[in-house]
Image (spheres, grey):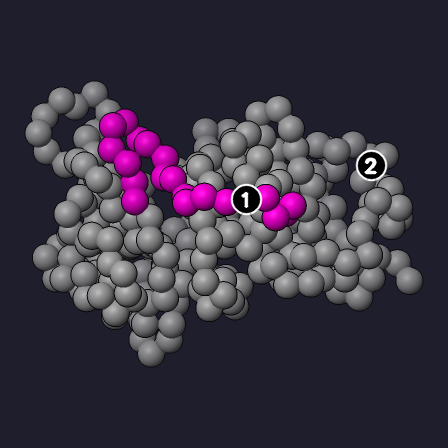
Amino acid sequence: MPRMLDVSDDVRAEIGDEEADRLLAGENAPGSYDCTSCRTPGHPDREHTSTVLFVGDETAVLAFAHAGCLPSQVVQVTEEQLRGAVRSISGEDGGPPAPSVPGQAVLGVTSGLVLVAGELHPALVVEPTGPIRRPGSSGPGDDFLPLLVEQGFSRASSVDRLPPVLHGWSVLLAMGQLHAVLQPGPAGTPVAWWQAHHPLQVTDGWRTAAATLRHVLLFAAPVGSIGRQPREDLLREALDHAAAGGLLVAAALPVSGS
């Protein structure tokens, strides 16, 4: 039986025609795999499967995903992210996640399920540890929210309404863990807006909701607006408070590297 494997033109260009043909012929494709997005088993003999190539600065890793979770594509990641992905595949990953540093402020990222219009949605809440200033600015203000609005995020006066989809941005959920929030790059290739130094663990419920709904809600607020809330109900209260005070922006981001 022919394998139901998809190798996109971008992946083929990276790995070469010979390797791509071997994959399609079943010579190098696995008999089964854990989906790089939802982490449940997949079988290229019985279900449509995507090849996903993660490309770092020096190395690359070819992974497999259910076609319903991710399309076949090339995803640019940092070498550190790639090493973390390999560790998570081999079961060697450990240690707490560490956020990236834009300027001198650290972006804190919290995951949780948020009830919107009667349905639970997977969400990420981003709050810096200090003011984010516009590049070239030396003033005392905080430009975090205006900068995000300029990127297409919407002001959220309430958490009870779904924010619009922000096209070009996405959430990279690979090997069942959160790796990055991606934004459009100058050459059309996604680049990391935020990246986890170690893959960020998410709950089974969060991962299932993300795979089902195919999007993640991203809420962002300035320093001191949300805090590190230990429970999802307290996180929701903090989000409602920030929205009422005009201190919240939001967008729905596809779960994909494209």
Q: Quadrant of residue 163?
A: bottom left
Q: CA distance from mark 2 to mark 1?
A: 29 Å
Residue pointed to by mark 2: 19
Please state the horizontal and vertical placement of residue 116, each as a whole percent of the image.
31, 71
The residue lying at 84 percent from left, 44 percent from top is 28
Amino acid type, residue under disc 2 in the picture? Glu
From the viewer's perspective, is residue 85 above or below residue 238? above
Q: Magenta part mainly helix, strand or loop?
A: loop
**Mark 2 or 1, which is nearer the eye?**
1
Side of 41 relative to 246 (left or right): right
Q: Is residue 98 visible?
A: yes
From the viewer's perspective, is residue 2 above or below residue 24? below
From the viewer's perspective, is residue 84 above or below residue 134? below
Q: Where, quadrant-wise, is the C terminus in this rendering? A: top right
Q: Nearer the viewer, residue 6 or 110?
A: 110
Amino acid type, residue under disc 1 in the picture? Asp
Please state the horizontal and vertical placement of residue 257, each as a whole percent of the image.
53, 45
Few, some or many C-alpha atoms within 10 Å of disc 2 (few <14, some 14-19, many ≥20)? some
First of labels 2, 1 by sequence position: 2
Magenta segment: 89-108
Residue pointed to by mark 1: 93
SS at mark 2 in the image: helix
Q: Which mark is residue 17?
A: none
The residue lying at 88 percent from left, 58 percent from top is 2
Is residue 79 magenta-colored?
no
Q: Quadrant of residue 231?
A: bottom left
Please state the horizontal and vertical placement of residue 90, each as a whole percent of the image.
65, 45
